[in-house]
Amino acid sequence: MQLYPLKLVTVVGESIVMHDIAMQGLKLGSSGYTLAEVIGEGARSARNVSLTGEAKTMKLEFIVSMDVAEKILLHVSRDYFEHYAIIAWMSDVQVVRGQQYYPDHK
Amino acid sequence: MISATLEASCLISPVLFALSSSEELSRIIASLERNLLTPIPLCFMLGVICKLIHGGIKIPKELYLSIAIFLLMSIGFIGGHELANEYREHGIGTVWKPAIVTLFLGCVTPIICYGVLKYLGRMSIADSAGIAAHYGSTSAVTYAVANSFVEHSHHPANSFLPTLVTILECPGIAVALVIGAWLSGKEQAKKALATGVPVRESRLREALYEVITGQSIMLMAGLLVIGFIATSFLSESEGKPFDPIYEFFNTKGMIFKGALCIFLLEMGLVAGERLSDLWKVGPFLLGFGILMPLANGFLGAYFGHMAGLNLGGCTVFAAIVASASYIAAPPAVRLTLPEANPTYSITAALAITFPFNIALGIPIYYEMAKWLGAT
């Protein structure tokens, strides 16, 4: 079975901006994303503002190539780190059917 | 700090004057007892106590979200129904003055709050505007509790009060966010000139759209229109086909009162969780969370009385003007003024003002309305 080396970008933080980050990720070259409600606590948990309605904390994941991963991480750190409770990281993953994530894939 | 306290006490001097005579004081104490010993505030207190002692009460998220929807729909539907009856009997003669007063207070209270926070509390522009947005808007649950109190006191409020709740939801948030976005935009532009860092794009328009199309307004205003249409256009001969629906949504009925108790229990749990943040907000905001509702409540009772509301109506109107939003305002503030610290606004609205209003504030507004001559 062939596995494709790619990057998994994970962003965890306030639900209020997660949809925006997902949309921005698509614009920066990601072919898709996964968004899920999660439970957790961090140093800035008090910044969770939603009493009802949406989940307080969300986890957003992109599987992308290295250059797109860097663009997404740069965007998140530049536009959201100062005022929002958000953390982002990148890790190596081996993806089945991963050819679709390469720019030259038809 | 002393001058700030003095100026704050000048601001609420009419309130203190209202409470001056000992006869009125003993009447207030009797009202407080009457209010505190009803199931709705007691459920809230149970929630707070449960959180403090790490008790095991857990309200499933789906349940309290469903109850929130039911409460908003009920307030809207019954409001629309009563508005149609009022319109049928008196035209718009009795409603237009309170509606204009509501709009006026919705615009004025956030400006007063902003001034107090910025100049007495020496808070930042973003924090002042963020908190002002919460206090300029209203809390539908406080309305429901106040309405229940005046019914219990045999002075039911004017039937069109839900219409006023709907009107009061938006302008306060809008005014405070415009002030905050404009002033903090100017501040950021200065900073950008000095440092070369680009100015953040304003999200005011997006936030205002979210407030207007948010769940609270859509459900309350939508059901208000539905209740109005159903009542106005269905004749007696058709046998009131919406009677079962009226019974289901009836804000005086057992379903509404029971649902309100469960929701208040959840609110108690949430407020109890926020109590630990009280030490973070400091004494100024603690005082603000109690004195500002009293001042706003007095304005509400005074202008409500001027607009012709009855005793129950003035009380409920004072309570909604005094209340702070904790559902519609927080996401809008977070989007528009991300540099504002939500711990301040949420703790003040939810852990200070909301408990104060439902435990002590509502009976005080009732006495204020009485003192102003409302009958």
Image (spheres, coloured by chain):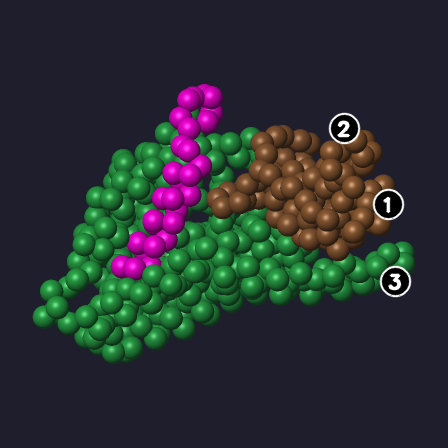
Chain colours: A brown, B green
**Local secondary structure at mark 3:** helix
Amino acid under disc 2: Met
Q: How many marks?
A: 3
- Look at 81% across and 48% down and name the residue there: A105
Q: Position of residue B27 (x, y in %)?
A: 26, 46
Is B68 one of the magenta-colored residues?
A: yes
Q: Which residues are magenta?
A: B51-78
Tell me whether the residue at label 3 lies in contact with that at label 2, contact meaning CB atoms closer than 8 angstroms.
Answer: no
- Look at 28% across and 68% down and name the residue there: B228
Q: Position of residue B238 (x, y in %)?
A: 12, 68
Q: Is residue B46 above or below residue B95?
A: above
Q: Which residue is mark 1?
A: A67
**Mark 3, mark 1: which one is toward the viewer?**
1
Which quadrant of the view contains residue B158?
bottom left
Cα separation, mark 3 vs mark 2, equals 56 Å
Q: Is residue B243 left or right of residue B267?
A: left
**Mark 2, mark 1: which one is toward the viewer?**
2
The answer to whether marks 3 and 1 sit on the same chain is no
Residue occupying the far front of the picture = A1
Q: Position of residue B259 (x, y in %)?
A: 30, 42
- Look at 57% across and 51% down and name the residue there: B331
Amino acid under disc 3: Leu
Amino acid under disc 1: Asp
Cα separation, mark 3 vs mark 1, equals 32 Å
Q: Which mark is residue B193?
A: 3
**Local secondary structure at mark 1:** helix
